[in-house]
Image (cartoon, rainbow, N blue to C red):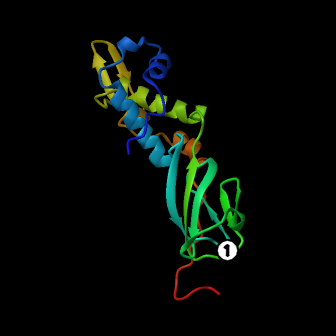
């Protein structure tokens, strides 16, 4: 499934202080790629959608990975479809009245609008790639010399951008390794 870019060409042109017609031919591809890089780092889609996931509850709860959760459509556990009174959604966690070793959850999630921080990171990354498409470190013509920062080389995120995306990542699950169950 192809997801839409997290910013538009018009937004990219405005971000780069250009007219849309001045953008290079490959600008849409660069936006798609920058969006994929941001999604991979945050482990979030950001746009609205529906997912079905198989999860192992910790105690009587599971954290749904794509956020924010809008609603739960179907929950299966113990080989059957659970009734609505057998689970409860609290923010991005699903709590169960009983215990299950695994559950399958179909739910809707995503933001009505891409968060401004996320859009800014996508636009900044795309702008860097379009400004320095040859990945030059330094360029000189006569007496004029331009040196690009390390962050402008390649389609990669700067450390500060990774830090900003960290807040969107799903919470880590605790996994116990070893023989048998802990109880």
Judge whether 126 appears above or below 60 on screen: above
Query: Which residue is depicted at the point 37% across and 21% down?
Result: 146
Query: Which residue is depicted at the point 68% across and 62% down?
Result: 84
Residue under numbered circle 1: 59
- Seen from the viewer's position, the closer of residues 9 and 54 is 54
User: Could you tell me residue 66's position as x and y percent?
Assistant: 56, 51
Query: Which residue is depicted at the point 53% across and 75% down?
Result: 79
- Seen from the viewer's position, the closer of residues 80 and 148 is 80
Which quadrant does the N terminus fall into? top left
Query: Which residue is depicted at the point 58% across and 33% down?
Result: 113
Q: Can residue 169 be seen in this view?
A: no
Q: Is residue 98 visible?
A: yes
- Seen from the viewer's position, the closer of residues 159 and 169 is 169
Picture quadrant where residue 125 is located:
top left
Give the left or right position of residue 77, taking residue 36 as reference.
Answer: right
Secondary structure, mark 1, is: loop
User: Could you tell me residue 116's position as x and y percent?
Assistant: 59, 31
Which quadrant does the C terminus fall into? bottom right
Give the left or right position of residue 136, taking residue 150 as reference.
Answer: left
Picture quadrant where residue 95 is located:
bottom right
Instruction: Tally the numbered discs.
Output: 1
10 Å crowding of disc 1: few (<14), some (14-19), many (20+): few
Judge whether 124 appears above or below 48 on screen: above
Give the left or right position of residue 37, taking residue 163 as reference.
Answer: left
User: Could you tell me residue 182's position as x and y percent?
Assistant: 62, 85
- Seen from the viewer's position, the closer of residues 77 and 26 is 77
Judge whether 1 appears above or below 131 on screen: below
């Amino acid at each position: 499934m192809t997801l839409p870019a997290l910013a538009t060409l018009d937004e990219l042109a405005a971000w780069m202080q250009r007219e849309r017609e001045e953008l290079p031919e490959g600008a849409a591809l660069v936006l798609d790629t920058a969006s994929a890089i941001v999604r991979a780092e945050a482990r979030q889609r950001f746009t609205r959608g529906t997912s079905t996931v198989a999860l192992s509850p910790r105690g009587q709860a599971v954290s749904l990975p794509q956020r924010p959760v809008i609603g739960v459509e179907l929950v299966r556990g113990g080989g059957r479809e659970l009734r609505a009174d057998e689970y409860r959604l609290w923010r991005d966690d699903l709590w169960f009245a009983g215990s299950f070793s695994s559950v399958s959850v179909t739910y809707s999630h995503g933001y009505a609008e891409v968060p401004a921080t996320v859009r800014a990171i996508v636009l900044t990354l795309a702008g860097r790639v379009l400004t320095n498409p040859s990945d030059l470190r330094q360029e000189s013509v006569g007496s004029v010399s331009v040196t690009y920062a390390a962050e402008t080389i390649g389609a990669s995120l700067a450390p500060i951008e990774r830090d900003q995306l960290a807040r969107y990542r799903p919470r880590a699950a605790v996994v116990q390794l070893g023989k048998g169950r802990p109880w």
